């Protein structure tokens, strides 16, 4: 453990009157060090509890999202938007790396532009 200091220096010109009065009360009763220590211990305990709560909440959200995805897959399959069950399962994606300057291969492109569609862009 590092060497302990005998005193603390607090810039009181940056404190509100209410905070200053509370600190002065503890300082006069010689309990300021204990009070500050208890606040720090409380904050440390709260931080560790917050991390556990956050982790638990994240796990709950993940389970909820997974549940919603399963329901969506079932709904899509029931309404004919999805093919066979094998098609819905996640398949490892093929390794298509797109690098700067590489032309992307688009297999199914459809559609067209009429001259009327381009009229609104003539002012560029």
Image (spheres, rainbow, N blue to C red):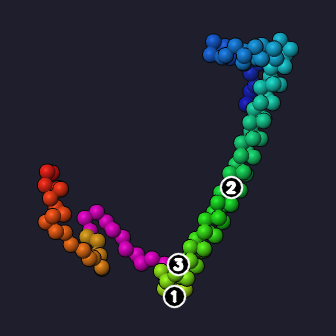
Decide which of tag 2 and tag 3 comes sooner along the chain. Answer: 2
Helix, strand or loop status at disc 2 = helix
Is 89 drawn above or below residue 8 in the view shown? Answer: below
Q: Position of residue 114 (x, y in %)?
A: 16, 68
Front residue of 14/120: it is 120
Label 3: few (<14), some (14–19) or many (≥20) C-alpha neighbours in 10 Å: some
Segment colored magenta:
91-102
Mark 2 lies on residue: 57
* 3D distance between C-alphas at marks 2 and 3: 28 Å
Q: In the rendered structure, which disc, 1 or 2, sits on the residue that comes first in sequence? A: 2
Q: Is residue 49 left or right of residue 96?
A: right
Q: What residue is shown with label 1?
A: 84
Extreme residue toward the right, this view: 29
Residue 28 falls within the magenta-colored stretch: no
Could you say which is closer to the camera, residue 86 or residue 112? 112
Looking at the image, residue 114 lies above or below residue 25: below
The answer to the question of whether label 2 and label 3 lie on touching residues, with beta carbons closer than 8 A, is no
Front: mark 2 or 3: 3
Q: Classify mark 1: residues with Cα within 10 Å, few (<14), some (14-19) or many (20+).
A: few
Q: Secondary structure at mark 1?
A: loop
Prevailing SS of the magenta stretch: loop
Alpha carbons under labels 1 and 2: distance apart: 34 Å
């Amino acid at each position: 453990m590092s060497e302990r200091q005998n005193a603390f220096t607090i810039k009181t010109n940056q404190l509100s009157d209410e905070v200053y009065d509370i600190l002065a009360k503890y300082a006069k009763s010689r309990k300021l060090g204990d009070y500050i220590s208890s606040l720090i211990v409380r904050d440390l305990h709260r931080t560790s509890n917050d991390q556990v709560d956050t982790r638990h909440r994240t796990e709950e959200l993940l389970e909820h999202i997974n549940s919603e995805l399963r329901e969506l897959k079932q709904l899509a399959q029931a309404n004919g938007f999805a093919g066979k069950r094998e098609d819905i399962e996640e398949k490892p994606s093929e390794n298509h790396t797109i690098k700067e300057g590489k032309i992307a291969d688009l297999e199914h492109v459809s559609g067209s532009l009429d001259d009327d569609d381009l009229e609104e862009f003539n002012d560029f």
